Amino acid sequence: MTMPRAASPAHRERLLRVMGVTPWRLRGGSAGGVEGAGAAVNDAPPGDRVPCVVVLPAGASAREHELVGRALRAFGPVMGRAARLEAGERGLGHVPVAAHYLVFGEAQARALGHELPAAVMAAAQIVLVDAPAALLADPAAKRRLWSGLRALGRSLGRG
């Protein structure tokens, strides 16, 4: 009985891309003892962009996260598996280059604007919706979220 051999790094990356998995790498430094972990996501060629990034406020409750998660999953696997970032007091940190950004709240939109280069923002579709806390309290905020998700779904090929 022969053991299957390990896939080459190029083959592994191609398989992950086919499955829709975006590999994340440390930018570098000694945070985890990993030196030269590879290129950052922002340094990736334009063909290696993630489809969608969701920007949420830091400190959202579990109920708010569940509401957002259900809404995203309702629009298919691309939205359900979208990268989720939280904008805190120190901003967003590293933001991956994406074709689409779904931003929950004006403060998070400002934080995204501070982190992204102008060329990336000009090329991306950025949809601003109400903060998750407003979604729980205001039916109009839910309608605006649904409209924003429909717009993203059309551009992501969901119809």
Image (cartoon, grey):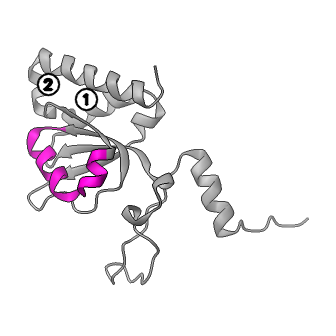
7 over 113 or under it: above or below = below
**The one of 112 and 76 positioned closer to us in this rendering:** 112
User: Which residue lies at the image location 14% right of the left edge and 58% below the top edge?
Assistant: 91
Residue at the location (8% across, 58% down)? 89
Residue 10, position as x, y percentages in the image: 65, 65
Tell me: residue 31, above or below residue 108.
Answer: below
Give the answer, above or below, for where 74 lies relative to 42: above
- The percent coordinates of residue 82 (x first, y second) are 38, 42
Q: Element at badge 1?
A: helix
Which is more toward the observer, 142 or 65? 142
Q: Residue 67 carries which label?
A: 1
Start and end of the magenta stretch? 104-122
**Nearer the observer, 82 or 33:** 82
Kindly report the distance in space between the C-alpha atoms of the residues bearing marks 1 and 2: 8 Å
- The residue that appears at 21% across and 39% down in the rendered structure is 103
Is mark 1 in CB contact (under 8 Å) with mark 2?
A: yes
- Bin the neighbour count of mark 2 within 10 Å (Cα to Cα): few under 14, some 14-19, many 20 and up: few
User: Does residue 21 belong to the magenta stretch?
Assistant: no
Q: Mark 1 belongs to which amino acid?
A: Leu
Q: Where is residue 34 in the image (x, y as percent from the top left)?
A: 42, 81
Looking at marks 1 and 2 on the same chain, the residue that comes earlier in the sequence is marked by 1
> Which residue occupies 42% across, 41% down?
81
Q: Is the magenta stretch mostly helix, strand or loop?
A: helix
Q: Mark 2 points at which residue?
A: 136
